Amino acid sequence: MATGQLFSKTTQALFYNFKQLPIQRMLDFDFLCGRETPSVAGIINPGSEGFQKLFFGQEEIAIPVHSAIEAACAAHPTADVFINFASYRSAAASSMAALKQPTVRVVAIIAEGVPESDTKQLIAYARANNKVVIGPATVGGIQAGAFKIGDTAGTIDNIIQCKLYRPGSVGFVSKSGGMSNELYNSIARVTDGIYEGIAIGGDVFPGSTLSDHVLRFNNIPQIKMMVVLGELGGRDEYSLVEALKQGKINKPVVAWVSGTCARLFKSEVQFGHAGAKSGGELESAQAKNEALRDAGAVVPTSYEAFEGAIKETFDKLVEEGKTTPVKEITPPQIPEDLNSAIKSGKVRAPTHIISTISDDRGEEPTYAGVPMSSIVEQGLGVGDVISLLWFKRSLPRYCTRFIEICIMLCADHGPCVSGAHNTIVTARAGKDLVSSLVSGLLTIGPRFGGAIDDAARYFKDAYDRGLTPYEFVESMKKKGIRVPGIGHRIKRGDNRDKRVELLQEFSRANFPSVKYMEYAVEVETYTLSKSNNLVLNVDGAIGSLFLDLLAGSGMFTKQEIDEIVGIGYLNGLFVLARSIGLIGHTFDQKRLKQPLYRHPWEDVLYTK
């Protein structure tokens, strides 16, 4: 593997299995380092395509999302690092697919627990094809001031604390990602910082070894010394011992193998990583530390002395003129995300939507403050839900029952009315449910089902002003306005609408007052004297009775009643009810497999 530098300031990666936080951290690191282009060229999310919005400094950018590794590599031929955030179940297969792409040079496998047999196959393929695998069970790696993998080095604050926004003179390699963060900090305190850091991963068979990276560091001119943190278990450190003995490394190596406390336990102890388990004396931390010391590495007497040994080695290099500490620079300020700034109290931002009828932020959704479970447990119905969501209060049972009756009576009026006709034609054209429903709803207006609000508005105004039915009807006639809620194409004075009769019977039996409805009946009496089809229709009945509901319940002010009528609440009741029937007509046509509708010629008057 030896070769040299893995990453640079122009390195770009493909990120497999979208995770927003690690990608955003990579982009924030790019901005901190002064990169001109984002280090993430593309995202691979099996089954998805498009773009993902993220931030590159102050600028919002769109990173392409690809559904397949091959497509991503073809679209981004300069992206030679593959960062794999797949689970341990699929990490091996996706990593092998990436290694087989000619454009991919480095694969980092984040998942731990990848089957060892799969890992061995990945290692063999990578070595045979001169490619590099970092991991499995790794946090990744970083080249200070240039490029980092995923969550390496943690937060921006930690990166700044560790001076990773610009290159130092130290090459660092460890098995542990968590301990890497500790050592980045220690190294920054006593040297000019990291040039490159790699966490090879804690599994039994890492894709690349400690010695692989130390030998590589040895070939990078900017790296003046190496720091190695091993751990008990396995024999990886002995390959480094051999390299030191054979003179393959000509730069100072400061090393420590963690796990010396294992001897305090009577039986074999499994530490955090799968590979951190001593399988004999040679795999103990003490034996490895002694072997490294004998081979020429600087090995302290304890982990507590590790930082001091690093400092001493670096100071000696400076003294001998073999390195000049890198000059410190001031990194740019990373713009803070709005959400975190709001949480910390640094900024305040206006909301974009106001909602007073429901809330989904707690344990369960609430309707006007009433938990959904409470609605079900109390045996409340659709009328009660409407009262909460539309009127923001729990109306008496007679009110919610009236609402339910209105919905039942207005759910459908046969296939010939304009709304149903439109829905049927649309459904037979092969359109989906929503399109068929909407085509029917769009016919609702002043001439079809949309007169409830107008009926309520005019009846209320006339009654409140004390107009007689004669004065009301004749004033409307002078204005050229038909009385809303009066008149029917089929029903007559001697053939009343059964729906109207049912509503009147219920309201007279249950409402405290029906003054508006009785006024509407008086108006009907006058209009019937003019024509037998000018009967009170269902729009007029619902409109006048809703006025009685609002006024008689004692739960609404005059201003609230005027607002409810003005906004269009009552027409909303017809829209809700008729949607049931229109959906039914859609399903009916599709169930019957009806063909495309074409209106018959004989039903059209063709004229000039």
Image: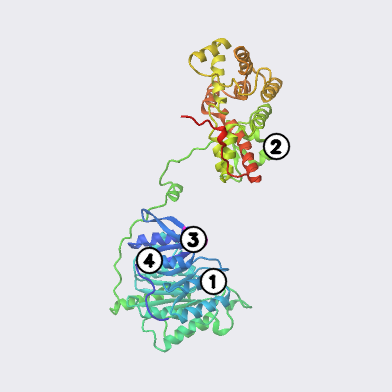
Q: Is residue 102 visible?
A: yes
Q: Main secondary structure of the magenta part?
A: loop
**Image position, residue 431 (x, y; %):** 56, 45
Whole-angstrom CA distance, mark 4 to mark 2, is 61 Å
Q: Is residue 152 visible?
A: no
Q: Which mark is residue 378?
A: 2
Which residue does the image show at 56% across and 41% down from the upper left? 426
Q: Which mark is residue 397?
A: none
Q: Is residue 47 magenta?
A: yes
User: Mark 2–mark 3 contact, CB under 8 Å?
Assistant: no
Above or below, 368 relative to 8: above
Q: Secondary structure at mark 4?
A: loop
On the rendered image, what quadrant is the N terminus found in?
bottom left
Which badge, 2 or 3, comes first in the chain's sequence?
A: 3
Whole-angstrom CA distance, mark 1 to mark 3, is 17 Å
**Image position, residue 43 (x, y; %):** 45, 62
Residue receiving disc 3: 18
Q: Nearer the viewer, mark 4 or mark 2?
A: 2
Residue receiving disc 4: 164
Which badge, 1 or 3, comes first in the chain's sequence?
A: 3
Q: Nearer the viewer, residue 303 or 341?
A: 341
Residue receiving disc 1: 93
Amino acid marked by disc 4? Leu
Q: Secondary structure at mark 1?
A: helix
Whole-angstrom CA distance, mark 2 to mark 3, is 44 Å
Identify the image quadrant of residue 512. top right
Which residue does the image show at 42% across and 43% down from the upper left? 349
Q: Secondary structure at mark 3?
A: loop
Which badge, 4 or 2, comes first in the chain's sequence?
A: 4
Q: Nearer the viewer, mark 3 or mark 4?
A: 3
Which badge, 1 or 4, comes first in the chain's sequence?
A: 1
Whole-angstrom CA distance, mark 1 to mark 4, is 33 Å
